[in-house]
């Protein structure tokens, strides 16, 4: 059985939605995904649908609030891959979350079950060029560079079950050009 060893999340804020990609790397000593990728395409599709469905279930268990409104992230696709060597497998999830941006401060909040991180992970939030990050509440070490917020969490970190990020959008920031 593969065990998780690292995670990455990439959030991109746009006018229509917040798009994000989640990538989990696994130590796959049995080379399960290598065999899966070499096997019948139906088996790969079934595994990717299983992954998508499980991630959707996990997201459905969270409560995401943006600007006071409940939003529901939707897992568009999941991909099973091998990264560089047969014993390193990866599950990649493509997610979109609709939202209604507003001029001024926008607040994203995520409520979920508290836990202890099993592995190291990093999350990046990339805001539009016109936006500015005002505040955050995240586990781990946070670094802000302009419109980029980076969160690094080490294995063993207590994750309290709440995250938030507040960012400002000036008038006309997300209007169509």
Image: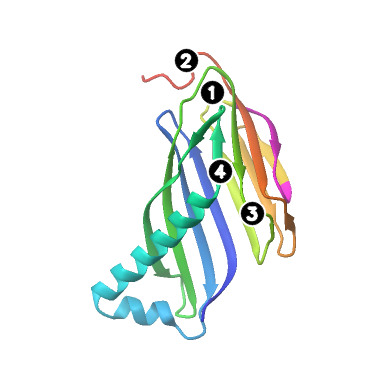
Judged left or right of residue 78, residue 145 is right
Q: Which quadrant of the structure image shows residue 142?
A: top right
Q: Are marks 2 and 1 in contact (CB under 8 Å)?
A: yes
Out of 17 and 123, give the one closest to the viewer: 17
Out of 112 and 44, give the one closest to the viewer: 112
| Residue 88 picture location, percent across and down | 50, 75
| Residue 39 picture location, percent across and down | 28, 80
Q: Residue at x 38, y 66 (%)?
A: 50
Q: How many marks?
A: 4
| Residue 42 picture location, percent across and down | 24, 73
What's the CA distance linking mark 4 and mark 3?
Answer: 10 Å
Q: Residue at x 44, y 54 (%)?
A: 56
Judged left or right of residue 120, residue 177 is left
Q: Residue at x 56, y 56 (%)?
A: 8
Q: Nearer the viewer, mark 2 or mark 1?
A: 2
Marking on residue 63: 4
Residue farthest toward the top in the current orientation of the protein: 171
Q: Earlier in the sequence, mark 2 or mark 3?
A: 3
Question: Dot 3, crowdedness within 10 Å: few (<14), some or many (≥20)?
Answer: few
Is residue 100 rendered magenta in the image?
Answer: no
Q: Which residue is mark 3?
A: 113
What main secondary structure does the magenta stretch of the protein show? strand
Q: Which residue is mark 1?
A: 130
What's the CA distance linking mark 1 and mark 3?
Answer: 33 Å
Q: Which residues are magenta?
A: 132-141
Question: Dot 2, crowdedness within 10 Å: few (<14), some or many (≥20)?
Answer: few
Q: Are marks 4 and 3 in contact (CB under 8 Å)?
A: no
What's the CA distance linking mark 2 and mark 1?
Answer: 9 Å
Q: Earlier in the sequence, mark 1 or mark 3?
A: 3
Q: Earlier in the sequence, mark 4 or mark 3?
A: 4
Question: Dot 1, crowdedness within 10 Å: few (<14), some or many (≥20)?
Answer: few
Q: Nearer the viewer, mark 2 or mark 3?
A: 3
């Amino acid at each position: 059985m593969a065990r998780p060893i690292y995670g990455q999340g990439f959030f991109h804020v746009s006018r229509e939605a917040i798009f994000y990609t989640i990538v989990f790397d696994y130590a796959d000593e049995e080379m399960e995904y290598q065999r899966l990728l070499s096997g019948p395409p139906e088996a790969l599709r079934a595994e990717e649908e299983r992954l998508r469905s499980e991630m959707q279930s996990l997201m459905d268990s969270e409560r995401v609030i943006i600007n006071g409104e409940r939003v529901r992230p939707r897992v568009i696709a999941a991909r099973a891959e091998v990264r560089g060597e047969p014993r390193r497998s990866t599950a990649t999830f493509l997610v979109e979350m609709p939202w209604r941006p507003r001029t001024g401060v926008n607040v994203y909040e995520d409520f979920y079950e508290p836990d202890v991180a099993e592995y190291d992970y990093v999350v990046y939030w990339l805001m539009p060029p016109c936006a500015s990050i005002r505040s955050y509440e995240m586990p781990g070490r946070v670094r802000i560079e302009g419109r980029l917020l980076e969160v690094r969490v080490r294995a063993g970190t207590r994750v309290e079950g709440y995250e938030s990020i507040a960012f400002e959008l000036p008038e006309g920031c997300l209007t169509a050009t």
